[in-house]
Image: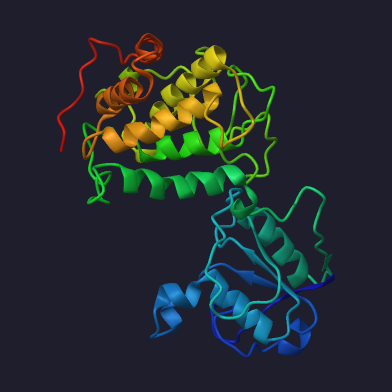
Amino acid sequence: NGKLVLVNDGVSADGGDHGCYSPFVNAAAVSGNIAFIQRGGCPQLTTLNPRANNAFATKVKRAQANGATGVIVFDSLGTTTTLTSFVGTDTVGIRIPAIFISGADGFKLRAAMLGGATLNGSAALGATLADLDGSFDSGVMSHEFGHGVTNRLTGGPAAAGCLNSTTGNQTMGEGWSDFFGLWLTTKPGSIGSTPRYVGAYDLAETVATGPGFRRQPYTTDMTKNTYTYAQLSTGAGQYTETHDVGEVWCTVLWDLNWQFIYKYGYNPDFYSSTGGNNKALQLVLDGCKLQVCNPGFLDGRDALLRADSATNRAANADLIWAVFARRGMGYSAVQGPRT
């Protein structure tokens, strides 16, 4: 809680409200109250790095040094109603809260203060502003750990860099990692058609509705997840970014996992080998061991077939072919050149 005080650094334009120099002329008024600072305005005043001098974190640090209990930074464009990204690395020991508001709102408040009005503000942690962190999301932790697994297994025991290149924009690492996260967080009683979302918790979204980090939910329902191999072909709207490409790979692995569950059942014991989920995970891991360096999607498919042949005497070959064909990766599919 506190009174809003328009800062005056004594040097910058607009009455010094850019907060470019410390101590402020009105440091006594700022102390114990909420500093009101205009964005930017500092480059012409300093021989230091202009970007650093204008940085949000630097301005907040100056206000803190002048005794402010909080900071509101308003955009320097008086007509804008949009919000910029209010980010910065706290390497300067900031211990007070700070927010950013639009220029349209900021200049109204500025005019009121210049007209003699007394404005008070308060901030409180609302019920919806939970203290969220990806470290508490088992799916995210499994995803990141999974990168180490797939990088270490692919290309043989002497290689650890076989997922660094691409084969026709077919980077698959994000797909395996999403799959591991989904697999490890599946609950007994779940069904494959239920949409699953990656990162919903971290974005403070409802886990059941997402949308999370990805473009489409993971589900066996092709009306809700429409991905096929064609998503990676050339042309407008096709995927090339590694996370986007990974969604397509994870989608087919997720389909495969559920087909194994439908055939063999679900076993909540992760250490077992009898459930369809257990068999699917083992197949994916064995496939990584058998695939070539810098694999494409069809290399990954063929490695899964080889793994099933070695472990299960090809008992699931028809199932694997059907799953991949459904997503456009059947017998006649053509893979891009390996690089």
Q: Quadrant of the N terminus?
A: bottom right
Whether residue 205 is visible: yes
Judge by depth and name the residue closer to the eye, 234 or 301. 301
Q: Nearer the viewer, residue 328 or 272?
A: 272
Relative placement, left or right, of 224 versus 44 is: right
Q: Is residue 305 above or below residue 116?
A: above
Q: Say above or below: 282 vs 31.
A: above
Quarter of the image with the C terminus in it: top left
Is residue 233 shown above or below 112? above
> Where does the image place residue 296, in percent across and percent down from the top left?
25, 30
Q: Quarter-wise, where is residue 138 in the image?
A: top right
Residue beneath the point at 74% across and 52% down: 130
Quadrant location of residue 14? bottom right
At 56% across and 13% down in the image, what residue appears?
262
Estimate the x, y position of residue 220 in percent, counting from the top left.
52, 17
Q: Nearer the viewer, residue 167 or 148?
A: 148
The answer to whether one can see residue 218 in this image is: no
Identity of the residue drawn at 33% across and 26% down: 307
Query: Could you tell me which residue is drawn at 59 percent across and 28 percent down?
Result: 196
Q: How far across and how far down the image is residue 191, in percent?
A: 63, 19
> Residue 72, percent across and down?
68, 67
